[in-house]
Image (spheres, rainbow, N blue to C red):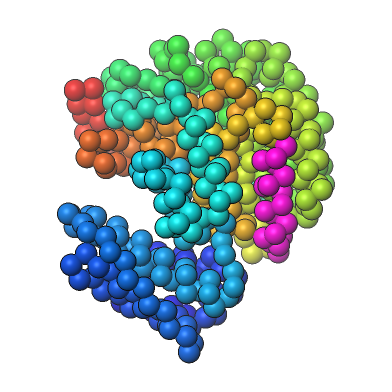
Amino acid sequence: MLTTDSGFYPDLKEIVDLFEGGGALDVVHTSREENGVFFNRVQISDRTFETEDVCPYSTAVEKKRYYKRFAKLSLYKAISAVTGETMPWGALTGIRPVKLAYGQGEDRYSFLTDTMLVSPAKASLVMDIIEAQRGIYEVDGSNVDFFVGIPFCPTRCSYCSFVSSVIGKAKNLEEYVDALVREIAASRELFTKLRSVYVGGGTPISLPKTLLMRVLGALSVFQGVEYTVEAGRPDMMDKDVLALLKDSGVTRVCVNPQSFNDDTLRRIGRMHTAEQVEEGFRLARSFGFDINMDVIAGLPGEKPEDFAKTIARALALGPDNITVHTLCLKRGSELKESVDRLPAGAVAEMVDHARSELTRAGYSPYYLYRQKYMAGNLENTGYTLPGKICVYNVDVMEETASNIACGANAVSKRVFPKENRIERYGAPKDIASYIAKLPVIIEEKNKLFSGLDG
């Protein structure tokens, strides 16, 4: 059990939860600050750990940031000393370690390894990503990426915690598309500097073709930029839908097998085979699309050798991007309470194998993000072939551009680089509530993005 006087209980609890069995420890944390010196004391059973960190600050925001950082570090060091465990990402618990590293200037590597206690391997991964993003990374609040959310799928994968509906059971498809088209139209005048368009889900191509045509038609004014659609499920792909995407100006599609093992696909609720993935991939490639592909390390029932087969079959196809996800089981996913996780070492072996094989095949890591409840306290990493970086992924993960998002559960973000802040507006998750609230959503987004190009 953790007790603290710091006011950062949720953040410190995340540190405790990094360690297997950490929740069973009796941990008492106290802290104070005097003239830029931060004092932290951690007591675990009969052992006491004390730290002093000197870091002058000029604003209340800086003071809070340092207070939290040093409190987390003190707790991490204490629990690590008691358990003998270290974490690959040290005391980092945030989603965007690359963005954090950018903020440290030329000292970013030492900040990660010496201050935050990140392993040299993970710190080097961050450095490789920063190098790969050269020429793409651009901090400009007037830049915009445009997102459209279509939260429907043919089936629900057992690991999924997204807010999405099974397409065959949805009763308000036409009403949703009506609202979505209206919101897209209302968003067209909010910006001039468009970086990319991304249509995600769910599985957007699970929409009936007539409704998908309406959404793509509303986006037809956005031409000449990277334009991605999550085709996702190969069992949803055919010549007609791919031709529609191509004729609508789409430049990139996602074909996401998650695994190339048929037994695994059945366990996680997929209605297709590995062979169908390969067929769908080749069909998409015949239309000239750039192709993104997702695989997941740590799926239930898989061993490192099973995952190695998935990596080998993905490389044989040669997608432009391959993102290696680490299984993350959140509340709302069917698997959350029904499976035993693989040992952290086995998942780490999978992730390390993927990095080795992908880099050997000419891919470079170019974006990375982390989530709570990830197996092995690891990460999701996107790899790219030379010249094939997905701009949308870089912008979203590093939060360098504003994001205008349309649809249920879509979160718009306006970036203010000079002020080092971001303002967000989230639409309702529930589809019926989104439809009913559409006039308010449009009004609030107009306010958020007012003067974006000024």
**Can you give x and y, in whole percent of width and height, for residue 40 in the image?**
34, 74
Query: Which quarter shows the C terminus?
Result: top left
165, above or below 232, in the image: below
Residue 381 shows in this picture:
yes
The segment highlighted magenta reads 339-357
Q: Would residue 161 be found to the left or right of residue 238 on screen?
A: left
> Quick check: is 257 in the magenta stretch?
no
**Can you give x and y, in whole percent of width and height, for residue 344 in the image?**
67, 60
Q: Residue at x 39, y 45 (%)?
A: 107
Q: Would residue 207 be found to the left or right of residue 284 on screen?
A: left
Q: Nearer the viewer, residue 230 or 299?
A: 299
**Can you give x and y, in whole percent of width and height, for residue 430 in the image?**
44, 46
Q: Quarter of the image holding residue 56?
A: bottom left
Q: Residue at x 72, y 44 (%)?
A: 353
Residue at the bottom extreme, as displayed: 46
349, above or below 273, in the image: below
57, above or below 236, in the image: below
Q: Quarter of the image holding residue 21?
A: bottom right
Residue 443 shows in this picture:
no
Q: Main secondary structure of the magenta part?
A: helix
